[in-house]
Amino acid sequence: MTASVVIVGSSVAGVRTAQALRRGAYEGRIVLLGAESELPYDKPPLSKQFLAGEWPAERVALLSAEAAEQARIELQLGVAADHLDVAERQVVMANGKRIGYDVVVLATGSQARPSPWVAESGLHVLRTIADSQALAADLARDGPVVVVGGGFIGAEVAATARSLGREVTIVDPLEVPVGRLLGREVGSMFVDLHHRNRVATHFGTGVKSVEGRAGQLTVRLTDGQTLTAATVVVGIGALPNDSWLASSGLLVDDGVVCDEYCRAVNAPEVFAVGDVARWMHLGYGESCRVEHWTNAVDQAACVAHNVFHPEALRAYRPVEYVWSDQYDWKIQIVGRPTRATSHCLIGDLGRPSARAAGKPRAVALYKDDSAQFTAAAIVNWPKALVTARRLLAVGSSFDDALSQLEQLAGPRMEPIS
Ligand SMILES: Cc1cc2nc3c(=O)[nH]c(=O)nc-3n(C[C@H](O)[C@H](O)[C@H](O)COP(=O)(O)OP(=O)(O)OC[C@H]3O[C@@H](n4cnc5c(N)ncnc54)[C@H](O)[C@@H]3O)c2cc1C
């Protein structure tokens, strides 16, 4: 019988694991440790509604003190775990306190990749609520914004800054930043989206330096051009928070390496969940680490089950899902487009659709070499998402998926590639 579960990391993966344990009738002790002093909060709105000032802090809350107490989840916030003593089964906190466990769940997530450039002030990364508040304060000030990094976080910040009336430029060393994920053709449509929203882009160009202070920053590009900015946001990816485990003896390799049940490969009483977990995905036949909100939630349910039912372990084998909100596009990706070798687009992202309230709508379907349907990227089309998700879950062929989505689209939305 597992008498105590200690969860390290108090964001969505940690909170959902604790809640799922209780929902599953686990009656033992649950301790939830978090480095930040804030009560647990959610991250996706930090680049969207919260950054725009549309949502108050209460709306991003994940767990109130009352809810924690009611669920008998012991919250210990404001101190980071310093290291893990696997032999003694103890989490050692930065203040020297040792917390014993029968099972420990590592949910320490990831951090923004640090900016390689340093300015006196006005240069931001975005990961925490404090980051979002600091950025919002600078975005409230007039003056141009330069976003470094054209991935999802950078694009969302650009869209939010535009909605606040700021002049925005995005810089990325790749010519088609989202092309890495979705292919060049679909990625180019994301570039057009920025342009249609009057965001300037310097793609295919790197940043050499950022100098100055808030309100008076200079961004020098590798092609010799210079941009002036009031605020600079650096969104160049994330790194797993796994360095505190260096002395633990656990296998750590861009995340905590786990088996298909999300148990650390060399310590079965240690589980990992969310952004920090690198587990064996049996469907892919390789280990993977996923930095998406829905993964943290789904994996938490699986980990909670496996912690409480070691006699009936479940392999974690999700169909991946991520969304992003940029301007008037709701983007939803199911499956893993990077496993594909070709794709086909149904719909038109350059033209408004009457059936999507005047917004464009489309779906890109991805297939691999064996003509298997591997992923879909959907814009403003909830029904296409439901269909694609269902077909991916049952392992549909690409031809079947294409035919079903064409039917859904109706006669006027022929595939265009
Ligand atoms: C601005 C932003 C927007 C996003 N938007 C989307 C989106 O639209 N769609 C989507 O699917 N995903 C989105 N994501 C990603 C999503 O939020 C993450 O995948 C999710 O938060 C991962 O949850 P997690 O609990 O694993 O890790 P995290 O959210 O990173 O939380 C980890 C927690 O552990 C704590 N911690 C770290 N180290 C220690 C330690 N040593 N001791 C104690 N505590 C520690 C941290 O302080 C943090 O509270 C976004 C992320 C950000 C930052």
Image (cartoon, rainbow, N blue to C red):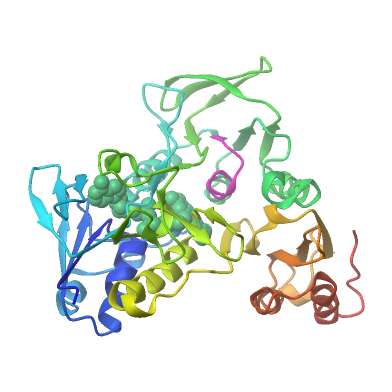
Give how far across and how far down residue 108 sits, in percent: 32, 52
Residue 46 visible in this rendered orientation of the protein? no
Residue positioned 74% across, 48% down in the render: 187
Question: Which residue appears farthest toward the top when viewing the image?
Answer: 224
Q: Is residue 412 above or below residue 195?
A: below
Give how far across and how far down residue 73 sits, in percent: 18, 71
Give how far across and how far down residue 372 sits, in percent: 77, 67
Inspect the magenta stretch and tell me whether residue 48 lies in it: no
Indicate the quadrant where residue 308 lies. Answer: bottom left
Indicate the quadrant where residue 408 lies. Answer: bottom right
Q: Nearer the viewer, residue 415 or 299?
A: 299
Residue positioned 42% across, 35% down in the render: 124
Q: From the viewer's perspective, is 278 left or right of 282?
A: left
Q: From the viewer's perspective, is 365 left or right of 147?
A: right
Residue positioned 14% across, 42% down in the render: 94
Q: Is residue 74 above or below residue 339?
A: below
Q: From the viewer's perspective, is 32 left or right of 276?
A: left
Inspect the magenta stretch and tell me whether residue 152 lies in it: yes
Quarter of the displayed picture in which ligand 1 can be seen: bottom left
Locate the N terminus and report the quarter of the image it occupies.
bottom left
Q: Nearer the viewer, residue 285 or 119?
A: 285
The magenta stretch is: 147-157
